[in-house]
Amino acid sequence: MILREVFFVFVWFFAGLTFAISIGIPNGYGVATSLIFISSASLIYLKPKFFELEDDDKRLIYAFLAFGLSMFAFVLIDGFRLRDLDRPSRFILVLPVMLLLLQAKNHQVWLWYGVVIGSILGFGLAYYERQILGYPRAKGGEYPIMFGDTGMMLGMLSFVASTFFLSHKRHFWLALSLIGGLCGIGASVLSASRGGWVALPLIGFFIFWQSRFLLKKKTWLIIVLILTTLLSSAVLSPKTGIKQRINEAVSNINHYGNGVETSVGMRFEMWKAAWYMFQRSPVLGAGKHSSITEKEWLVEEKLINPKLIRFGHAHNEFFNALGYRGIVGLAFLLMVYLIPLRLFMKKINQYKDDWNIKPYAMAGALVPMCYMDFGLTQVMFAHNIGVMMYAFPIVYFWAALRWAERERLGKC
């Protein structure tokens, strides 16, 4: 029994470690998720019973399973290249981890520690790369966009962690989680990845609205003034490069259509190409590899820029799904976003004032919210870190929420 309890502590430690070293250490997310996946081999001895799972547990399992299998089917249709099975397989391989965590009793607080530490480490690495190494954009061994977007999500999760620590009067970790929130935003800023910045006001309002009764109005006003001052200073400071990147985006949009090739303009061209491919193959799309032939035809017809042929995706998750996998692929993508979001939002509404449970539900809902925002300018699921930092956190926070529920009901 003691060994079992110690093992469960390590399982939740590995879950927290996923966040803690996700971007602060290159490929850290892969190390931590590998450890917890290996730990799921213990299910042979734990022998969980599937029929004892709650209906909502099964809905989450079915959503991930359906998405993973649908992606396998699209790989098969598109010529069946084994390497293309790697990323979608994570949505299936994470399911044993979910079953394990639903067996691993009551150490879910490790998730909050990991989120806060991960934000701070991510910012530390970003600062080192920009200020010491002189990189134009912080990237931490990833593409700058992936690094910055993951940093932004960790920052938002850190602010959710602050609601947990505030409600439990854990003042040291409350202060650290607020610092972690700012550090996550800072990592995104230093990566100069503009797409993730859109998430800040949207997700920030979500966190504020859900936690608005935790503090008095006067306290909230002070917090808003402090954050507004910090963000305004960051935008206006030449060292951060925020203002420059925003001006570049505006200039890129203004020059689109004038024959000037810009970052934003090329994205518009990629979205246009994906839309053309969808129109030609609306049900199942053109396919990732088969799309090369489609793009060559579009170039011959002078419908898209010839340089688009070298890009492997559309830099937009939704257009990418439409162009490469058609309306069917888009439906499965929306499913893997909206079903987890609906399940977590259901728990938020069910436990409006229970701050042992609600923060886990808020954090879980925040993940698909962030990804739907990030997906407007990047194909997150085309990258290992994008897949891993979606599937695993959702499973982690769902299992943590379910244990918090059991504690409330006296079932553990």
Image (cartoon, rainbow, N blue to C red):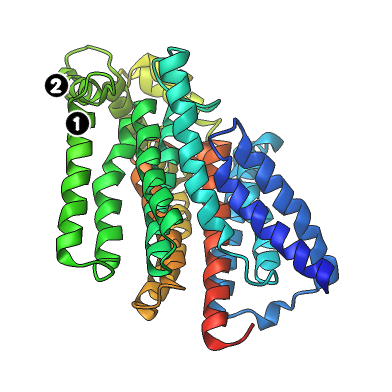
Disc 2, SS: helix
- Could you say which is closer to the camera, residue 316 or residue 46? 46
- Could you say which is closer to the camera, residue 225 or residue 375? 225
The mark nearer the N terminus, 2 or 1, is: 1
Name the quadrant containing residue 45. Answer: bottom right
Seen at 68% across and 54% down, the residue is 93
Q: Residue 254 carries which label?
A: 2
Q: Name the residue under label 1.
A: 233
Query: In the image, what residue type sits under mark 1?
Result: Ser
Is residue 313 in view?
no
Residue 59 lies left or right of residue 297; in this view the side is: right
- Could you say which is closer to the camera, residue 39 or residue 298? 39
Q: How crowded is mark 2: few (under 14 residues within 10 Å), some or many (20 or more)?
A: few
Up/down of 115 relative to 259, above or below: below
Q: CA–CA distance between discs 2 and 1? A: 26 Å
**Picture coordinates of residue 183, whole percent (x, y):** 39, 38
Query: In the rendered picture of this protein, how many numbered marks are placed on residues?
Result: 2
